[in-house]
Structures are given as structure tokens and as C-alpha cells.
Amino acid sequence: MTDDAAGAVFGALADPTRRQLLSAIADRPATATELAGALPISRQAVVKHLHALAQAGLLERVRSGRQVRYQVTPAPLSDAVSWMARVGGQWDDRLAALARTFAR
Amino acid sequence: MTDDAAGAVFGALADPTRRQLLSAIADRPATATELAGALPISRQAVVKHLHALAQAGLLERVRSGRQVRYQVTPAPLSDAVSWMARVGGQWDDRLAALARTFAR
DNA sequence: CGGTGGTGCAACCAGTCAGTTGCACTATAG
DNA sequence: CTATAGTGCAACTGACTGGTTGCACCACCG
């Protein structure tokens, strides 16, 4: 049952700011301060979002000196895809194909 | 840019009760009253969840007489999968394969 | 026609959450 | 060593949301 992991991922991706952050980090790993500079919110707000993404297992913290750089660890996305394939595979051919790929 | 549609789907699936409802309806279409009977919450709470799922385009309302039956319309799941494949495809081979399948 | 089961609508409550501000701590630069 | 840039931690606020209750409405059955 990967339902809990999938739920954590869905919850993390439910917020548009968090999707934006994850997408930015996917392009290039970055620190919270850097990311806050590109967004209209405070650094602390960014830190909270990064914490939420890390809780879902989608980010990894890498300390280097006095900075903390974040990078993507996409493994939990598989759980989410697997869940969607299970409920939707009955109707949609492409989702059914996923269900085969991500079966567990 | 299917990001908004994906966001709606993630938001809808972020709640465990909503995932449970969608999964149940996937097995067999049902009415709000029926679904509420199988859950420890009121019918009105179920109705609100179904409304949220329908807003994300995951459910369809079918009126028959004095009842309203809900059924799954999984198309928006493709948008969500597409989004995940885009951010994760760089690291995970299986997600990269998805990115090809769901490219748009 | 009258009763009843299924829905819809609105108000209300409590908890969670995104965001802010303020301050303490640590590591590098000069 | 001192100043400063980067981070961490805690308290506070406003808004959103999952849940409830109460009532009005409508379609079917006798």
C-alpha cells in the first residue's frame, strides 16, 4: 500500500508555490535564499515550503559551508503515478499502460 | 501549459477522504448518500468532497430521477502525470518514459 | 393528494496552513 | 577578532477548509 506516500506527494504538490519551487530546483539546485529572491514571498515562507517538499521525500538537503542547497529526489513521484494509474487505468489506455509500468 | 489543471488535480487528491471516494467511485459509480453510508462523515461532507473532485474534472454528475450518481472521468489525471514527468524525467528513467507518452 | 426519501443551500465552528516578523546562531571574509 | 551573510527557530496573524447542523425543495409511491 503506497497510498500514504502518494498522499504526501499530492499534498506537497497541491500548492502552486511549491510546484514552482520544485520545478525551479529541478532545473538547477538552489538555496532557500536564492529561491526567495525570485519569488514575492519571504525566505522563511520558502523554507517552510521546502520543508514540506522534503517531508514528502521530493527534496534532499545538502549542506555546504554555511549554505544549504536543495536538490530533487523524484522517487516518490512514482508512488503518486502508481496511485493514479490504479484508479484511472480502467478507462484510459495510457493510464493502463502506466499501471503496468509502475505495478508493485 | 497544463499546470493549472495539474494543480487542481493535486489539490483534489491531497485529501485522503477524497482519494478514498474517488477510488470507491472508480470501482462502481455511486450517489453521495450511498458513499456517506460507508464513511464516518455526514452526507454534506461527502457532497463537498465530490464537488471538489468534480471541480478538478475527475468526476461527472449524472442525474437519474431524484438521485444523482457520480462516475469517474480520468482525463485530468493525464495532466498531473505529464507535470510530474516533466520535473522528474531528468532523473528517473520510468518518469522520462512517461514524459514521452504524455508529451503535449 | 399527502408522505417520504434523496438533494441542495446556507450558516457556523474548529483546526490547519501560508505568510510575516523578530531574534539567535554559525561560518566565512577582511 | 569583528563584521556580515546565510541559516534556523519561535510566535503571531489572517485566510482557507473539512466538518457539522438545520431547513427548504423536489420527485416518486401509496
Image: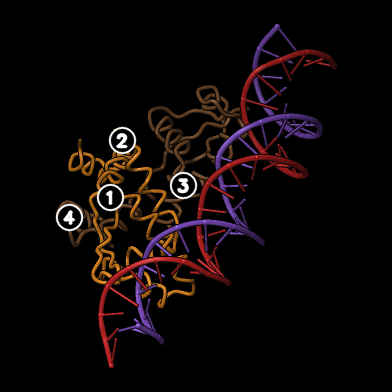
Chain colours: A brown, B orange, C purple, D red
In the rendered image, the quadrant that contains the N terminus of chain B is top left
Asked if the residue at tag 1 contacts the one at tag 2, i.e. Cβ–Cβ closer than 8 Å, the answer is: no
Label 1 belongs to which residue? B77
Measured Cα–Cα span from mark 2 to mark 3: 20 Å
Amino acid type, label 2: Gln
Label 2 belongs to which residue? B90
Amino acid type, label 4: Asp
Residue occupying the point 49% across, 71% down: B41
Tag in front: 2 or 4:
4
Residue occupying the point 43% across, 56% down: A7
- What chain does badge 3 belong to? A
Tag in front: 2 or 3:
3
Secondary element at image label 1: helix
Can you tell which quarter of the image residue B60 is in? bottom left
**Badge 3: residue crowd in 10 Å (few <14, some 14–19, many ≥20):** many
Instruction: Compare marks 4 and 3 and give the one earlier in the sequence.
Output: 3
Tell me where residue B42 appears, x and y as whole percent: 48, 71
